[in-house]
Amino acid sequence: MSRRSTRAARPQRVPGTLTGAQIVWECLARERVTHVFGYPGGAILPVYDAMPAYPVHHVLARHEQGAVHMADGYARASGSVGVAMATSGPGATNMVTGIATAMMDSSPLVCITGQVSSGLIGSDAFQETDITGVTLPITKHNYLVTEADEIAPAMREAFYIARSGRPGPVLVDMTKDAQQAACPFDWDAAEPKPPGYRPDHRPRAAQLRHALELINGAARPVILVGHGVVLANAEGLVKTLAERTTIPVAMTLLGIGAFPGSHPLNLGMMGMHGEAWVNEAVQQADVLVALGMRFDDRVTGALNTFAPNARKIHVEIDPAEVNKNVAVDVGLIGDVGEVVETLLPGVAPNDHSAWLARIDDLRRHATARSILNFTDDGRLYAAHAIHDLWQATRGRALVVTDVGQHQMWEAQYYRHESARSLITSGGLGPMGFALPAAIGAKLARPDADVWAVVGDGGFQMTMAELGTMVQEGLKVSIAIINNGCLGMVRQLQEFFYGARYHATPLVNPDFVTLAGAYGIRGIRVTERSAVIPAVEAAAAHDGPILLDIRVETDDAVYPMVAAGAGLDQMIRRPAQEALR
Ligand SMILES: Cc1cc2nc3c(=O)[nH]c(=O)nc-3n(C[C@H](O)[C@H](O)[C@H](O)COP(=O)(O)OP(=O)(O)OC[C@H]3O[C@@H](n4cnc5c(N)ncnc54)[C@H](O)[C@@H]3O)c2cc1C
Ligand SMILES: Cc1ncc(C[n+]2csc(CCOP(=O)(O)OP(=O)(O)O)c2C)c(N)n1
Ligand SMILES: [Mg+2]
């Protein structure tokens, strides 16, 4: 009996043509994509079958959510478009959290999904999901492609839309028959021309003049630096603006790193868990210069009391963001790098030493309440662990955090000196982001000392990606800030639900043994004196390492602006005695 050839399903090449599947890889290679993060299945198999002929490395994730977070981590670390791939139905729906994460944080992604053959669409075919319908509100744009000759134009347009203007995720769903059919491939003819899409904006001259008057005439100004500054690679220009005017700089969570943490004009993070002096400075300011940030509710607190005395300038690439949450005096719509460059010749040197001295007073008053300044009571707090990680890595690590208390302590206690040295999910905040995003970041920047700082809860959401990390031979260091609970939610229960801790205590696996199952070295840290040696051991170790850092359960992130409260109405850390 003759055996059926396993190669029989290969599409026939017609001279002068490529299959849709080959066109996908041609486009990826021409877009200079080096890594694709994905997971195969029947509806995308023609694309996988064509892959080996192309110089693109495929990273096999353990879950499609992980694949998208990896692509996102890659994009945020490199500034290039990240690419993720999955099959139809469950593969595509597993991508949803990752896509929504990228959408909320303006991260450029192209997600490619297989779809059932075009003749089956609408028939509830096996693994058919209307993924363009599902992702319509969480993508910048999406496509359903049913013909091979539509693939190249859709792919080129997807990359163009993902990276231009305000970046974001674009999904290209392609039917199996479109992947299998052959057609001529013409890269030049597929040049993107999306109708009605205008990503380039320039501010009007009158608005620029108005902004200069406000900046030059301010007595108590603050610059608010956001993620847009990172996306625009404009940190150098923003530093020039701050130094010329001596205007202090506050950052959003996603703006951290866009202004050097050790710079004398750096105030730190503002907002719900921003430092007290930063929020107080924002509230007392007479001029706010908001650069590439979108006045998220975690940043502003109650809108009706936000920065009541300040004239506001908003530099923003997306016109829909201007006057959306906060009414501003001047909206400068355009790329923040270009706008600041245009403003700089008109910006007068200035000396705001009286205002800086006032903020320093606020800072002195607040730092007395920092847990780092409490006398050592022998307990290991998360803030200690993160502070010591910062010291031991000399502030030069590329840190990827998960979501929760540890994320906020990282923002407060790890001082970042450069843009793209903190990768964190701000807008959607999905637990499980850190490990896969760290894998993507390490592949984008192999020379970086990549640390995933993750909670014990969030780690368990995507810990299967340890397998991906090992399979790729990556040296990523993992610090589990293990407080034995879903700390951020426990904190809400402590403050607002009478300390009724339902569904927040965790019974955890032994993370060190778990690491061992993957061949990863694990170290348990239970004392403060062991943190720095463990971080140094990670640096010296030729491979990934997992630190299970057992920190106090009973602690909260301070300050905290409660929902609906004004930015300067913060819940402050109690005196040390209250911790006992
Ligand atoms: C548990 C938790 C707690 C949090 N607490 C805080 C907190 O205390 N403080 C805080 O700040 N955040 C906090 N966040 C994050 C918060 O939810 C927002 O994600 C964050 O504040 C958004 O920062 P952003 O506006 O700088 O970035 P984004 O949301 O990414 O917005 C960037 C803006 O820049 C614009 N832009 C993009 N490119 C350009 C360009 N080239 N030129 C000009 N503009 C451009 C975009 O259109 C967008 O409007 C928290 C998140 C979590 C999960
Ligand atoms: C996928 C998802 N589910 C639920 C939440 C709500 N949530 C925010 S923080 C948090 C607790 C996180 O616990 P852990 O990972 O242990 O970090 P910790 O706060 O203890 O540092 C939860 C449940 C979320 N952000 N993401
Ligand atoms: Mg926890």
Image (cartoon, grey):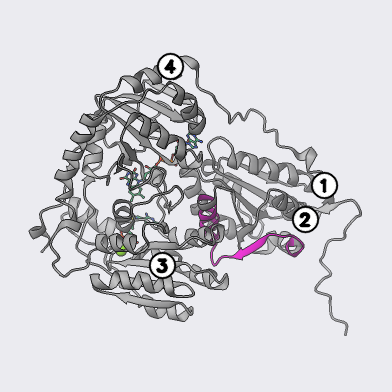
Per the rendered image, the range of residues in magenta is 51-76
N-terminal of the two: label 1 or label 2? 2
C-alpha span from label 2 to label 3: 38 Å
Residue under the image location 49 percent in, 29 percent down:
341
- Tag 4: amino acid: Arg
| Magenta region, main secondary structure | helix
- Tag 1: amino acid: Phe
Q: Is residue 316 left or right of residue 157?
A: left
Q: Are marks 1 and 2 in contact (CB under 8 Å)?
A: yes
Which residue position holds label 4? Answer: 209
SS for callout 4: helix
231 vs 257, nearest the viewer: 257
Q: Is residue 105 above or below residue 344?
A: below
Instruction: Say which of marks 4 and 2 sits in front.
Output: 4
Q: Is residue 556 left or right of residue 297?
A: left
Q: Is residue 61 magenta?
A: yes
C-alpha span from label 1 to label 3: 44 Å
Q: In this orientation, does residue 291 appear?
A: yes
Q: Are marks 1 and 3 in contact (CB under 8 Å)?
A: no
Mark 1 Cα shell of 10 Å, populated few (<14), some (14-19), many (≥20): many
403 vs 472, nearest the viewer: 472
Residue under the image location 19 percent in, 63 percent down:
554
Q: Measured from the top left, where is residue 380 in percent x and y?
A: 22, 67
Q: Which mark is residue 478?
A: 3
Which residue position holds label 2? Answer: 22
N-terminal of the two: label 2 or label 3? 2
N-terminal of the two: label 4 or label 2? 2
